[in-house]
Image (spheres, rainbow, N blue to C red):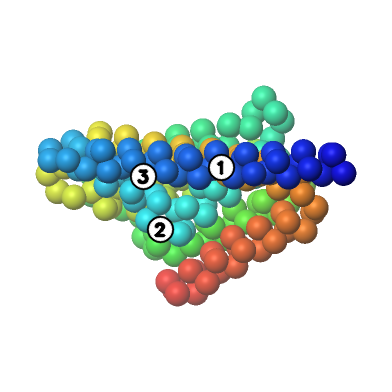
Amino acid sequence: MQTQTTRSARVRVWAAKGLAAVAALAVASSAQAHPGHGAESFAAGLAHPLGGLDHLLAMVAVGMWSMVALPKAWRTAGPAVFLAALLPGAALAAGGIGLPWVEAGIALSVVALAVLMLNARRIAPATGFALVAMAGVLHGQAHGAELAGGHSFVAYAAGFMAASTLLHATGLWAGALLQRLPGWAWRTATALIGGSGIFMLAARV
């Protein structure tokens, strides 16, 4: 009984921390939204990953997969690979070099990451990293294409990289939490992410 009470208390603490992180992001976004191209670009970059369900689900999924599939010392490697691919993908799009079918590819990446989550302990990490990197490039393309003319790419990139890092951290936290729950909780989360990706893909092709 004591163990169950302690576990419930920990879940409440983790939930409070998650809400505090979201609130801090909202405050930071508001604080940055003052006159000046740099500030406007940073605020826009900060908001963009959070404004699309496809971006949000993909980045959280990367963190969740990393928590389960990778050794403890390497759990941040999944998010790091995604971020490393995200930036050049965005830079190419901002420079006018865009890939075809990016929106459909992003939706497909959500489905692929859900499959990766479902088979976290059966798919080799190298294959997982490759999928994560491809997803990062596609999501970066979407971010870069949204950069408004005359605004700073550096400030904008700093914003979406910061938001993406927070989403990855949320995924790591969620992955750790779900590992403490029965197996059906992980499968349900995976199904929700994959189902959302399938729905988005159907709407874009």
Say which of 23 and 46 sits in front.
23
Residue hosting label 2: 52
Residue 114 drawn above or below residue 157: below
The mark that comes first in sequence, 3 or 1, is: 1
Q: Secondary structure at mark 2?
A: loop
In this rendering, which labeled residue sits more in front, label 3 or label 1? 1
> How many C-alpha atoms fall within 10 Å of the one at disc 1: few (<14), some, or many (≥20)?
few
The mark that comes first in sequence, 3 or 2, is: 3
Inspect the image, locate mark 2, and give the three-letter code of the amino acid beneath it. Answer: Gly
Please name the residue shown 58% across and 31% down the image: 76
The x, y position of residue 75, in whole percent, is 63, 32
Q: Is residue 135 left or right of residue 125?
A: left
Where does the C terminus fall, quadrant-wise? bottom left
Please name the residue shown 24% across and 38% down the image: 32
Residue hosting label 1: 16
Inspect the image, locate mark 1, and give the three-letter code of the amino acid beneath it. Answer: Ala
Residue 89: give its label: none
Quarter of the image for residue 197 reads: bottom right
